[in-house]
Image (cartoon, rainbow, N blue to C red):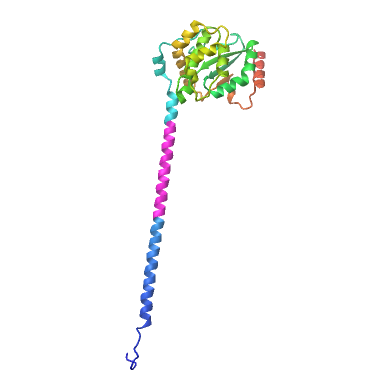
Amino acid sequence: MDLGPGRRCAPPRFVLRGVSEKNRDGKRTARERLAVEREKQKAADKRRRALIVGASVVCVLGLAAVIGVVAANSGGDDESDSAGPVVAPSGALGKDGTAIPVGKPDAKATLTVWEDFRCPACKSFEQTYRPTIHELTDAGQLKVEYHLVTLIDNGLGGTGSRNAANAAACAQDAGKFAAYHDVLFRSQPMESDDAYADNAKLIDLAGKVDGLDTPAFRTCVEDGTHNSWVAKSHQAFQKGGFNGTPTVLFEGKNIYQDRSMTPAKFKQMVEEANKGQ
C-alpha cells in the first residue's frame, strides 16, 4: 500500500508473531525431547549399574560358597592316602579309634572335645576350663575324650594343625598326652603363623614335659607316625556335621555354644551327673 511520498507500509505484525511463536514452540519441543532422552539414558545407566552390581554380588557369593566347600572337604581321603597307613596312638578309643582319653575310665561323666591346636577359640576354652577339668578328672568324676582336627590347616593352609596333632598323639604313646596338650595350647602361635609345622618347634616344646623328649618321641614326630590317624580324626569331625572348633559335648549338648555356661556351672553339672548314677 502506498501511503504517499516517503511512507511505506510495514509487513503485517501478525506474520512476525506467527514465525516467532513457531520458533519458540520448535525450541521448546526440542528441549522436551532432549530432556526425555536424557531421562531415558539415566534410567538405562541406572539399570546397567544395578545389573553390574548384582552380578558382582552373585560372583562374590558364588566364590564364597566354593571356598566354603573346598575348605570343608579338604583334608579328606586324599590326605589320609598320601600319609600312609593309619596308626592310632596307644589307648585310642571310640568307633573310629579317634578319641584320646584323659581321666579314669570308670568316671561317670564324659566330656567330648574336638580341638585344633592352631585354633584361638580352642585356646580360649582351654584357658577358661582347664583348672576345672583337671580338678574333675583328678577326682575321678570326669573323663575327657579328645578328638584332634585340622580345620585351620584346611582354611589358612599349612600343616601346623596336623603336625601338632601328630606330636600330641606321639605324647599319648608316651603316656604324656594331657601335659603336652596343655603345653601346646599355652604356647599356641598366632592363628596365621604356621609355627607348629616345624617339628623342631614341637620337639622343643616337649622339653616342658618331664620325660617326654626321648628318641622314640622325636622319631614319632619327625616321621609323622600318626599323620593318617589325624586325617581320619578330621574326617570323623566332618562326618559328625560339626560347625567349628572347639566343639565341646556334654550329655549330647555343645556346652561351648551356651553363653550362660561357666566353669562353676559345668562343675555342678558333672557333680549332679555323678550323683545320679
- Which residue is pictured at 39% across the width and 74% down the height? 21
Position of 62 with respect to 100 (left or right) is left
Q: Position of residue 34 (x, y in %)?
A: 38, 61
Q: Position of residue 106 (x, y in %)?
A: 60, 8
Q: Position of residue 38 (x, y in %)?
A: 40, 57
- Which residue is pictured at 49% across the width and 5% down the height? 215
- The residue closer to the viewer here, 217 or 108, is 217
Position of 107 with respect to 53 (left or right) is right
- The residue closer to the viewer here, 145 or 222, is 222
**166 up-or-down from 189: above or below:** above
Q: Is residue 115 magenta?
A: no
Magenta part of the chain: 41-65
Magenta stretch, main secondary structure class: helix
**84 up-or-down from 118: above or below:** above
Q: Is residue 62 magenta?
A: yes
What is the quadrant of residue 208 in the picture?
top right
What is the quadrant of residue 263 in the picture?
top right
Q: Please state, as top left, top right, bottom left or bottom right, where the C terminus lies in the image.
A: top right
Q: Which residue sits furthest left?
A: 2
Q: Position of residue 24 (x, y in %)?
A: 39, 71
How many marks can you see? 0
Q: Please state, as top left, top right, bottom left or bottom right, where the N terminus lies in the image.
A: bottom left
Residue 254 visible in the picture: no
Residue 152 visible in the picture: yes
- The residue closer to the viewer here, 186 or 201, is 201
